[in-house]
Image (spheres, helix red, strand yellow):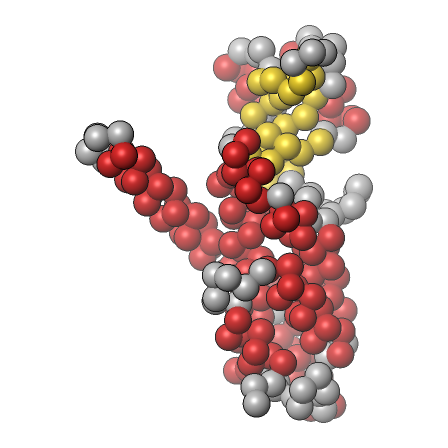
Amino acid sequence: MASMIESIHGQVVEPDQELSALLNRSLLAATVLRESSVCAWIRAERDGYGEGAEIPAYRRGDDAALLAWRPGLGWVEAPITDAQRKAVSDYSLPTGITELEADYEAILRKGGCPSPLDPARANQIRRLTSLDTDLCQMVPMSGVDRVLQTVRMGIRLWSGALLEAGVRGQGSSFSSGDRAAAAGVAERLEEILQQAGEAADAAVAEMRRRQGGLLSRLLGRAPA
């Protein structure tokens, strides 16, 4: 029978495996292994980053669209100049994996994920754009997919590093030697997430390239 870590490592590469379920199993393993930094990362990714929390680099970008609330119409793309658009397009996406995964089809139909602005940022943008209404940002699908891919790859690399360190355990039980070895892996969490982000960037770029090629074929055009 595969150990918990072996099971997580094997399932994370299966596209039908829900990432939120894998995060729950990974959180259990990290908790038993007493890896507090890994637990904190998994919880934040699963549940979302609260106000004032530091948002990881892979959850930030500079290509969000600005949306403005129009009574009777709802959220519409804000009527701003190209220069203003460039100045207000940087974003942070705090939404947790559980919510992103549950709403993914709706996010896909919208072409992105609405993300609220904190009050200070919203007021700054209002002054810059002279818009006197509620504002939010639309994080593009590439940004959403980057988060999902990075976290999935992060779990894969973390669990793989545990296996390389000899951490397997029996069921959900781990020895003191396992916990000592796991502590060394936890110290490399930032490095692991950087590697995961780089791999995710490549995966998302390839995903967009294939989608572009498919769209060109559907429309009867040769890909550029």
Q: Residue at x 71, y 83 (%)?
A: 172
In the rendered image of this protein, does residue 121 appear above or below residue 209?
above
In the rendered image of this protein, does residue 12 appear above or below residue 199?
below
In the rendered image of this protein, does residue 2 appear above or below residue 215?
below
* Residue 192 visible at all: no
Assign the C terminus to one quadrant of the image. top left
Assign the N terminus to one quadrant of the image. bottom right
- Residue 107 position in % (x across, y down): 57, 38
In screen coordinates, is 106 left or right of 211?
right
Query: Can you tell which quarter of the image residue 59 is in?
Result: top right
Q: Residue at x 64, y 38 (%)?
A: 92
Q: Nearer the viewer, residue 160 or 56?
A: 160
Q: Residue at x 47, y 54 (%)?
A: 200
- Residue 7 position in % (x across, y down): 57, 78
- Residue 33 position in % (x across, y down): 73, 79
- Residue 27 position in % (x across, y down): 71, 68
* Residue 110 visible at all: yes
The number of numbered discs placed on residues in the rendered structure image is 0
Q: Nearer the viewer, residue 169 or 69?
A: 69
Q: Residue at x 58, y 60 (%)?
A: 18
